[in-house]
Image (cartoon, rainbow, N blue to C red):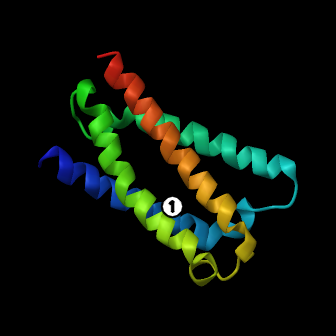
Amino acid sequence: MSLPFKSLGLGFAITAAIFALFHFAGPWFFLDGRRPFQLNFMAGAAFGLMLGLLMHHILQVPRKAATQAMALVAVPGMLVMAAVGSHFAVFFPRLDPALDKVFGSLMLWFYGFSLAGALWVARRA
């Protein structure tokens, strides 16, 4: 299977997993206080960076293709999560609608770190 199809397929799978995670466990992510907020963003950065650094292994592509692969993985997630964020209360009725900005920022943070990790791998190839 070609790189674009593998990458986009993985992107949709990750998007579905993120959506399910926030749909079912969302109240556990958005707790009051600064510490849970900081922990969410630290975890988002760590998982995103790990995904980007391992992208060439996950999709079994050359290290030089890691950035292209990660970009194609990130596109479905960023587009879908932007749509979800714009109608946050519809998709996540158990969560406070004011959390839409935090959710959107967390998604950008995650995908930004994943792209940075993939760029690091590709530049070192």
Residue 101 location, x and y as percent? 67, 62
The C terminus is located in which quarter? top left
Up-down: is 10 above or below 89? above
Q: Position of residue 91 (x, y in %)?
A: 56, 79
Residue 66, horizontal then vertical, whole percent: 30, 33
Secondary structure of the residue carrying numbered label 1: helix
Identify whether 24 is placed above or below 46.
below
Residue at the location (56% across, 64% down)? Answer: 21
View extreme (left): residue: 1
Q: Nearer the viewer, residue 25 or 49?
A: 49
Quadrant in which residue 60 is drawn: top left
User: Looking at the picture, does residue 113 appear above or below residue 15?
Assistant: above
Determine which quarter of the picture holds residue 120: top left
Answer left or right for 115 relative to 92: left
What's the residue type where badge 1 is placed? Ile
Q: Which residue is mark 1?
A: 18
